[in-house]
Image (spheres, rainbow, N blue to C red):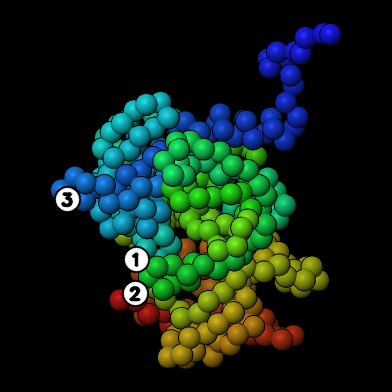
Amino acid sequence: MSALPSSQEFELDPYSARVAHVYEVVGPAVASVVALRPNGQPAGQGSGVVFTPDGYVLTNSHVAGGQKDFQIVLPSGLKTSARMVGDDPETDLAVLRMSASGLEYATFGSSAKLRVGELVVAIGNPFGYQTTVTAGIVSALGRTLRARSGRLIESVIQTDAPLNPGNSGGPLVDGRGRVVGINTAMAAAQGICFAIGSDTAEDVAARLMRDGRVRRARLGLAGQTITLDKRLVRGLERASPNAVMVSEVMENTPSARAGLVSGDVLLTFDGHVLSGVDDLHRLLTSERAGKSIAITLVRGTHIESLTIVPHAEQ
C-alpha cells in the first residue's frame, strides 16, 4: 500500500488557493480591538483592519462603543494601545490610531465594482478566536441597513460568508486581497450577513482622519443604486450605467419641498453625475447646506430638472 503524499505535495484547488492567498495578504492587518472604559476595564471586543503603515485602524462604531481608549492585538503578537480618532455612528464606522508604525496594512478595493456571486472572504476575531477566516459569496448589493442612530446606511453588501459576534469591524475581502467592506451585522436568519461597502468606508475614514467627525448636509430621502436601461444610458451619453433611485421621501424635508417623489431616478447633483448612492453621500458636504442645488432626474419617461436646498446636519 503506497503512502499518502505529504501536505506539501498537494496542489490546492483554485477556490482554496484563492482563499489562502487572501488570508496571507490581509490576515496580518486584521486587529483584535478591545474597547476600554475610563477605569481600564474592557467595555467590548471586536475586530478592525489596519489600513495605513502608521497605525490607523478602521472598525465599527458599535465596537468602539463610545470609548476613547483601546487595546489592539495583531497576529504578529504585537499588543499596543490605541486612541479614538473619529466616530461616525450613522455609517457604523470609527477610526482608531495605534501607538505603532511600520505595520503591515490592507488596501481598499471598490465595492461599486463587486458582482453578485463573487467570492468574498471575511477575516476577524469571533468569540475571541483571533484571525478566523470564513468565505462565501456576494449575495446581494445595494441593501440598506438601519444604524443604531436610526439613519439608513445605504449601499450595504449582503454576503453568506459566516459571521459571529466578534467579527464586527473586520474586513470583507475580494479574491484579489482588497478590502471591499467592513463587516457590521448578522440577520437572525442563517447565512445573511452585512458589510459597509468600502467606497463608503474609505470616504468616511478620510473625513474622520481629517476632521474627527463627518459633517453632512441632508436631503431627507432614502435611495438605492440601480442600473439604468442601456438605451437610456446611450441616449444620455452617460459614462456610468448606474444612477440613484429614490425609495422614500421624508415629510418636511428638502426633498419633499423640492417635489421629489418615490421612484424618481437621480442622474446628476450639482453638475456631478451620480453613479450610485455613495456618490450622493460624498457630495452632501456641509458646504452645500443652505445652497440651491440643481438636480436632473428621470420621472416616468421624462427627464426633469429640479432645485433642492440641502439643510445642515443638526
Which image quarter: residue 13?
top right
| Mark found first going from the N terminus, 3 or 1 | 3
Q: Which residue is mark 2?
A: 313
Outermost front residue: 1
Q: Residue at x 63, y 43 (%)?
A: 135
Q: Is residue 52 above or below residue 172?
A: above
Quarter of the image containing the C terminus? bottom left
Q: Which residue is mark 3?
A: 38
Q: Is residue 283 above or below residue 212?
A: below
Which image quarter: residue 226?
bottom right
Q: Is residue 234 above or below residue 39?
A: below
| Mark found first going from the N terminus, 2 or 3 | 3
Residue 125 vs residue 285, the one in the foreground: 125
The answer to whether mark 1 and mark 2 are in CB contact below 8 A is yes
Residue 211 falls left or right of residue 23: left
Outermost left residue: 39
Amino acid beneath label 1: Arg
Which image quarter: residue 268?
bottom right
Q: Return the mark for residue 215.
A: 1
Percent x, y for residue 295? 55, 78
